[in-house]
Amino acid sequence: MEVWLWAVIGIMALIIIALLIKIYILQKAAKEIDNAFADRLITDTNTLIDISSGDRVMRHLASSINKELRKLRAERHRFQQGDTELKNAVTNISHDLRTPLTAICGYLDLLEQEEKSEKVTRYVMAIQNRAEVLKQLTEELFRYSIIMSVQEPMQLEPLCVNDILEQSLVSFYAALTKSGITPQIDITKKKIIRTLNRTAFLRVLSNILNNAVKYSNGDLNVVLSETGEITFSNTAQNLNDVQVGKLFNRFFSVETARNSTGLGLAIAKTLVEQMRGTITAQYHDGVLSVCLDFPQTAG
């Protein structure tokens, strides 16, 4: 009896060991599929998932995932090609529009010098205003398409944020005061050094200040803290939380007023992200705050 009992125990032990080995092989295959699938999602490669296990079910699973990966890769390439073609088309169209628009504005300037009735003068002024808006929108669209089409990494260098911010504020001071805005400026004496692209950073500051000129209710506070965060805040009673959440969206504009293209802050966001920074907007008690922050320069 004992012999049979030990035999049964031995057989069960062998079965358990075999099952444990089988489970280990399946777990290993599942982990290989998981790691390979995660890698294929983030890399553009034709290499498919392959596993070391010979288990029929796991190999069928890997084959099914490979089939879906082929479809996903084809869709990705189709999207990338279409996206590139669209960007190129927008760039070309916006570039082609600049020449006739410049000519229209030139002829309007010549027409303004001619003798004309008060009614015609009013019509000419209206055409000039709308032509100028269209010209600005075309220019912004051209710049935006150029920025989005750039494939090479942006050239960065250590720059003093204090100096560039002061330079931008000085260049905008006349436009601000003309709009009845006397900016309150608080720039730390501590030199804030960040790795940036000078042209792109100036463009970001310019777009944010332009936005303040358009939508401020008469005030603007600019603060550069010792931590390197730049905050632009102004009263904007006509905004709401939904609009603020869309400020960085392409072509979104708070109002359809003149000179409002809806691309300025979208361009700023793209450039900030290319410089590995963050740009956010907050709205509290009727005050809009746009905050810029860039990672500290190592050194």
Image (cartoon, grey):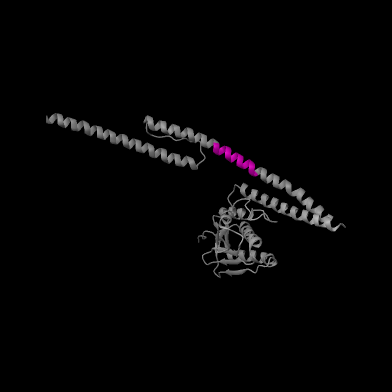
Q: Is residue 283 above or below residue 7?
A: below
Q: Percent x, y for residue 16?
A: 25, 34
Q: Number of numbered discs present? A: 0
* Magenta stretch: includes residue 134: no
Q: Residue at x 79, y 57 (%)?
A: 125
Relative to the observer, which residue lies in front, 188 or 112?
112
Q: Main secondary structure of the magenta part?
A: helix
User: Does residue 100 show up?
Assistant: yes
Splitting the image into 4 quarters, where does residue 171 fall?
bottom right
Relative to the observer, which residue lies in front, 251 or 155?
251
* Magenta stretch: includes residue 84: yes
Residue extent of the magenta highlight: 75-87
Q: Residue at x 15, y 29 (%)?
A: 4
Asked if residue 256 lies left or right of residue 60, the reply is right
Q: Residue at x 73, y 49 (%)?
A: 98
Q: Percent x, y for residue 234?
A: 60, 64
Which quarter shows the N terminus?
top left
User: Does residue 155 show up?
Assistant: no
Q: Residue at x 55, y 37 (%)?
A: 75
Relative to the observer, which residue lies in front, 217 or 231?
217
Q: Percent x, y for residue 183?
A: 63, 68
Q: Percent x, y for residue 83?
A: 61, 42
